[in-house]
Image (cartoon, helix red, strand yellow):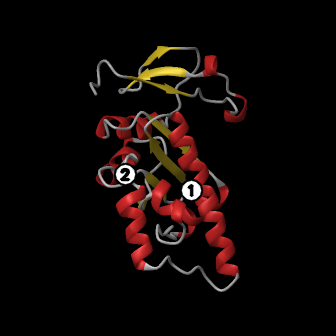
Amino acid sequence: MSLESSSTPHHPVGVSKGHLKPNDLLIIDLKGELIKGDGVVSSEYRLHTAIYAERTDCQAVVHAHPPVATGFALAGEEIPDNLLPESAVVLGSVATVPFAMPGTDAMAEAIHPLLADHKTFLLANHGAAVMGKDLYDACFRMETLERVATVILHARTLGGPRPLPNQDFDHLLNTALNGQLN
């Protein structure tokens, strides 16, 4: 993916994400320069473009602040991948990105070492980011992250989650992940 020729959809600053329409999206290049659309590019573009630049298999990045997953990020708690089948299959190993000031180059630098081995990220004291092979895949991954975080939180009130048996977890990793974005 060339930094000069690649472009990515991005939402403008000050627009409710729940009310966005396709025409509201801004098209930017990997340097954050506006190619198409009207509006101010969010400072969070650095996080998105860092992922696109490193992972050529990634065609969509979703960054959000889902309440329960963000609570895990705030508490410095990990989301294990061996508790629910969808954790292993959809999320993979969830990386925790050390805190970096949102909207800065430091955020892109903080996530960089984790990009090769992960597709789901908790951003310490900030939120979450996921990547996908397309927008639907990335959105599904973000929804799954929040659902898994919620189930783990509930399980903790009932005595604590119990991991999948090792042989079943290994089977999931060896068979179900075939064809998924790595």
Residue 89: mark in rendering: none
The residue carrying mark 1 is 145
Question: Mark 1: which amino acid?
Answer: Leu
Pick out the residue farthest to the left. 2
Residue, x 55% and y 81% (percent of image)? 162
Pick out the residue farthest to the bottom. 159
Question: Mark 2: which amino acid?
Answer: Asn
Residue, x 35% and y 62% (percent of image)? 174
* Quadrant of the image occupied by residue 50: top left
Q: Secondary structure at mark 1?
A: helix
Whole-angstrom CA distance, mark 1 to mark 2, is: 20 Å
Between tags 1 and 2, which lies in front? 2
Nearer to me, 156 or 38: 156
15 versus 57 height, above or below = above
Q: Picture coordinates of residue 90 (x, y %)?
A: 49, 54
* Quadrant of the image occupied by residue 105: top left
The residue carrying mark 2 is 178
Q: Secondary structure at mark 2?
A: loop
Nearer to me, 103 or 167: 167
Q: Picture coordinates of residue 161 (x, y %)?
A: 59, 79
Nearer to me, 86 or 152: 86
Residue, x 44% and y 73% (percent of image)? 168
Is residue 27 among the parts visible in the rendering? yes
138 versus 78 height, above or below = above
Nearer to me, 159 or 76: 159
Pick out the residue farthest to the right. 19
Q: Quadrant of the N terminus?
A: top left
Q: Is residue 61 left or right of residue 109?
A: right
Numbered disc total? 2
Crowding near pointer 1: few (<14 within 10 Å), some, many (20+)? Answer: many
Is residue 122 among the parts visible in the rendering? no
Which tag, 1 or 2, sits closer to the chain's start? 1
